[in-house]
Amino acid sequence: MSTWSKIMECVPNFSEGRDLAKIEKIVDKFRAKAGVKLLDYSNDEDHNRLVVTVVGEPEALKDALLEAVGQAVELIDLTKHSGQHPRMGAVDVVPFIPIRGCTMDEAIALSKEVGEKVAALYHVPVFLYEKSASAPHRENLAAIRKGEFEGMEEKIRLPEWKPDFGPAERHPTAGTVAIGARMPLVAYNVNLGTANLEIASNIAKKIRFIGGGLRYCKAMGVELKERGIVQVSINMTDYTRTALYRAFELVRIEARRYGVPVVGSEIIGLVPMEALIDTASYYLGLEDFSMNQVLEARIME
């Protein structure tokens, strides 16, 4: 990667978290490709979702992603899909994040190019979101996804929800996809010591921005059936402006009103080192601590 002049990150989410054979076939499209490096992938059976983190030179990344999208469209049938995480497509969301040597404008241009290709090659309707959105009401992924796969059959025919690319008709098995450019996002979940989903959902409503909570925080309640607990599933959309520790502490504060303990938390996929350093500094009470004091960061300079 050190020889790449431009590094773009992509974190596609696929609606398959249980069938390991299908997961491997999708992830394989990112392996052994010049100009592309697969960094991480994780699947969750309760969410029934696969999250892949990959970086690469923009053109090589685009080609690998298009192959993965084609594989997912072939393998995933949303008429037979169920899970705790909202979804509207076999490939549910594809964000591009500029990392090094490239700008947000380049990420936006790449997202539009990929969106046009996905619609042309696979006949899957594409909505542009976040920084790539064609209208203000399309910036928020939750607004686009509202109604999910089932509701999209009627929603997509409304003039205000005409896709940016592709037919104004839901793909019969692969649904629709949101593609866009955004800041680095941290997928952060806080687990609660209760099986009551209503409690997790109520806490999520309190901490997310749309409910009067943290500015760069999206959240929802999720049931983890296999563990017999629930979690507040959080997306931190700008960790530099809303820190992870604030989300954690606010969940803990809200959980107290129900007499429910926080029993753990987890990060899905990769996380910027700065986000963890910020949180560690808060809990350790470090004064004037900086990234320059992190050994690994200095080695990588």
Image: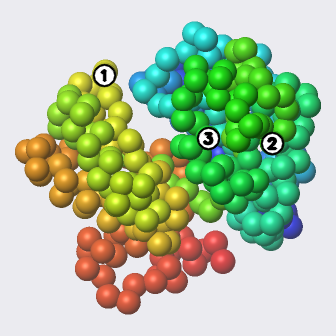
The residue indicated by pointer 3 is 144
The amino acid type of the residue labelled 3 equals: Ile
The answer to whether 196 is drawn above or below residue 77 in the figure is: below
Q: Residue at x 32, y 88 (%)?
A: 287
**Which secondary structure, mark 2?**
loop
Residue 173 in view (yes/no): yes
The amino acid type of the residue labelled 2 equals: Asp
Residue 192 location in percent, x, y?
Answer: 22, 40
The amino acid type of the residue labelled 1 equals: Lys
The residue indicated by pointer 2 is 164
Relative side of 118 to 213, left or right: right
Q: Residue at x 63, y 51 (%)?
A: 137
Relative side of 184 to 115, left or right: left
**Which secondary structure, mark 1?**
loop
Q: Are marks 1 and 2 in contact (CB under 8 Å)?
A: no
Residue 22 in view (yes/no): no
The answer to whether 223 is drawn above or below residue 300 in the figure is: above
The residue indicated by pointer 1 is 225
The residues tagged by marks 1 and 2 sit, at their Cα atoms, a distance apart of 37 Å
- For the C terminus, the image quarter is bottom right
Relative side of 66 to 249, left or right: right
Residue 142 location in percent, x, y?
Answer: 54, 43
* Pointer 3 or 1: first along the chain: 3
Q: Quadrant of residue 209?
A: bottom left
Q: Residue at x 88, y 48 (%)?
A: 113
